[in-house]
Image (spheres, rainbow, N blue to C red):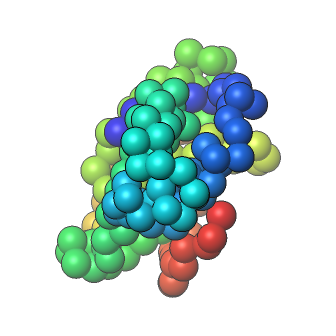
Amino acid sequence: MPLVSNVLRPFAALDDTDRAILAELSANGRLANNALAERVRVAPSTCLARTRALRESGAIRGFYADVDPAALGLPLQALVSVRLTEHARAAVDAFRARSVRLPGVVSVFHVAGAEDYVLHVRAASAEALRDFVLDHLAVDPAVQHTQTSLIFEQARGLG
């Protein structure tokens, strides 16, 4: 999965049809092209061409299955806030590049505020989560501080 750029992409050229396609695919990424075309009121060939163009432009970054983490043997989820020791661009970029490859990391968010990053992590158990923090974050010289918050429940919003 590619890293999301930290620079906002210029999507001002998207029209109402493009935005409708994006909204429909956000709700159901498995929607067949003919059904998508019908919902956004364009010809199937037009819909397919626009969807391809949206993928090529980066407006559509990928398609994913929403899998229950427990089915993967990873029922425990947490948000791990990370404060870095240094904030030079190279240090920040290097931490991001390392963190997305760590086992169990679902998402990495570069955030404003007291912390620099929030990592969404899945683990098999509390012990495995503790080991993740100790083995991958606490020993990283770029990491000054971590704080872990367990996720009791996750619900997907409409966005």
| Residue 100 quadrant | top left
Horizontal and vertical percent position of residue 70: 27, 79
* In the image: residue 10, left or right of residue 44: right
For the N terminus, the image quarter is: top left
Question: Which residue is the extreme one toward the front?
Answer: 43
Q: Residue visible at 64% across and 47% down?
A: 17
**Vertical order, 110 against 156 (above or below):** above
Q: Report whether residue 119 is seen.
A: no
- Between 123 and 58, the one lying in front of the other is 58
* In the image: residue 87, left or right of residue 72: right
Q: Residue visible at 31% across and 71% down?
A: 67
Question: Which residue is the extreme one toward the right?
Answer: 113
Q: Residue visible at 76% across and 43% down?
A: 112
- Between 138 and 36, the one lying in front of the other is 36
* In the image: residue 101, left or right of residue 9: left
| Residue 140 quadrant | top left
Horizontal and vertical percent position of residue 25: 49, 58
* In the image: residue 82, left or right of residue 38: right
Horizontal and vertical percent position of residue 23: 60, 58
